[in-house]
Amino acid sequence: MKTQKISEAVVRRLPIYLRYLNELAMNNVTTVSSQDLGQKLDLNPAQIRKDLAYFGEFGKKGIGYDISYLIEKIRQILKLDRHIQVALVGAGNLGRALCNYNTYLRNDMKIVAVFDALPDKAGEVINNLVVRQMGQMKSVITELGIRIGIITVPATEAQNVANEFVACGIEAILNFAPVIIKVPAEVRVHYADFTTELQSLAYYLD
Amino acid sequence: MKTQKISEAVVRRLPIYLRYLNELAMNNVTTVSSQDLGQKLDLNPAQIRKDLAYFGEFGKKGIGYDISYLIEKIRQILKLDRHIQVALVGAGNLGRALCNYNTYLRNDMKIVAVFDALPDKAGEVINNLVVRQMGQMKSVITELGIRIGIITVPATEAQNVANEFVACGIEAILNFAPVIIKVPAEVRVHYADFTTELQSLAYYLD
């Protein structure tokens, strides 16, 4: 696996496949065709076959994909078999929403630490997570082996938080603040910015 | 323009270009090269040139792109020159966060109506928006000419809300609930699901 570089577009589709495959598995479905996947996910079946072919020969002609095998493989590819720990900075409305969302994340990936710069917020409990002070970040991240950081602070604070994440050894950042952040090349940043989501939807209006 | 079908990946990158171009314009920068754009946005310059070439010949060799012209064109392409009205259903933490986010959206796209199924929430004010009852949806959407709907309700309620949006003539939906929703083919759905964002980030961990 991973003998060739996989494009970001493919990496972004894999969790979408995974979600639907998990749904099927919960309903005791055992195989699925690329046609079924394509119809459900509004993707071209040929595209799906191409995406999955990056990782090996999962499907069988005329039968389709073995769902439990495919789930296992995608989880391996996405490294979800590792119990990844996530930290979040910014316990406002959005931060709270994400912590409550934790329930939907399976055991593979969890927000395990929440920080906020406001001293008032320290000690607050959100969905079993205690809000901590920024000064505790380094020790908590090291102790819990946290590798991914989420930024849900105002735009003006996002770069500061990113800097602190980097200083604490965070390897990947999901930034919800509506601003571009600068990090060293080895740190991966994804932007989960609602503006861009909404703007790209507008394109599809007639 | 739009003589050829533009891929979703390109449509999703345009708002990202737009955000950075707006930043540059605010700093009185007038031209930018695809190299600069690429470096800032962590994209291949050739990819950027290809993306923008879909829409016509914007750039000049050795000079780069005229920023104000490019902003205007991308806004036209994304149909942001139209003042698009957005409705949101689900005034929980996430819904509140998005309403507060309204401040960052320019005049081109605004959440102008908020609904919640809980009678308790009706009348609550979030960032100048009054939470309305679901029964008012049809009349409000028609009256305000709302075309895009955002879903921030629990997973179990998302399909119901999607059905109501469709019945009210909504043309595009941004779904934050962690569940796949079914809508007629002419309605566009984007999923803004944190799980998939986090899972695709995990791939980039060593």
Image (spheres, coloured by chain):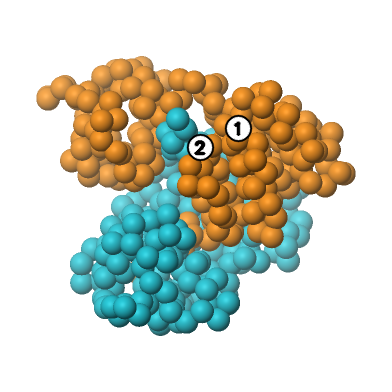
Chain colours: A orange, B cyan
* Tag 1: amino acid: Val
Name the chain under label 1.
A
Q: Which residue is the site of mark 2?
A: B198
**Would residue A123 appear left or right of A200 to someone viewing this image?**
right
CB contact under 8 Å: marks 1 and 2: yes
Q: Quadrant location of residue B1?
A: bottom left
Name the side, left or right, on which B163 lies relative to A165: left
In the visual, does A120 lie left or right of B60? right
In the rendered image, residue B78, in percent from the top left (x then y), is placed at 40, 69
Q: Position of residue B191 (x, y in %)?
A: 45, 46
User: A194 left or right of B69?
Assistant: right
Q: Please identify the quadrant where the N terminus of chain A is shown.
A: top left
Q: Secondary structure at mark 2?
A: helix
Q: Quadrant of the C terminus of chain A?
A: bottom left
Q: Residues within 10 Å of mark 1 (few under 14, many from 20)?
A: many
Q: Amino acid at mark 2?
A: Leu
In this rendering, does residue B151 appear at all?
Answer: no
Residue B114 sits in quarter: bottom right
Residue labelled with disc 1? A86
- Relative to B195, is B58 above or below? below
Q: CA distance from mark 1 to mark 2?
A: 9 Å
Give the chain of mark 2: B
Q: Nearer the viewer, residue B183 or A92?
A: A92
| Residue B162 seen | yes
Rendered residue at 43%/26% (across/down): A79
Do the residues at discs 1 and 2 belong to one chain?
no
Kindly identify the residue that appears in the image at 47 percent across and 60 percent down. B40
Location of residue B165 with respect to A86 vertically, above or below: below
Q: Position of residue B111 (x, y in %)?
A: 59, 64
Q: How many residues crowd around disc 2 within 10 Å: few (fewer than 14), some, or many (20 or more)?
A: many
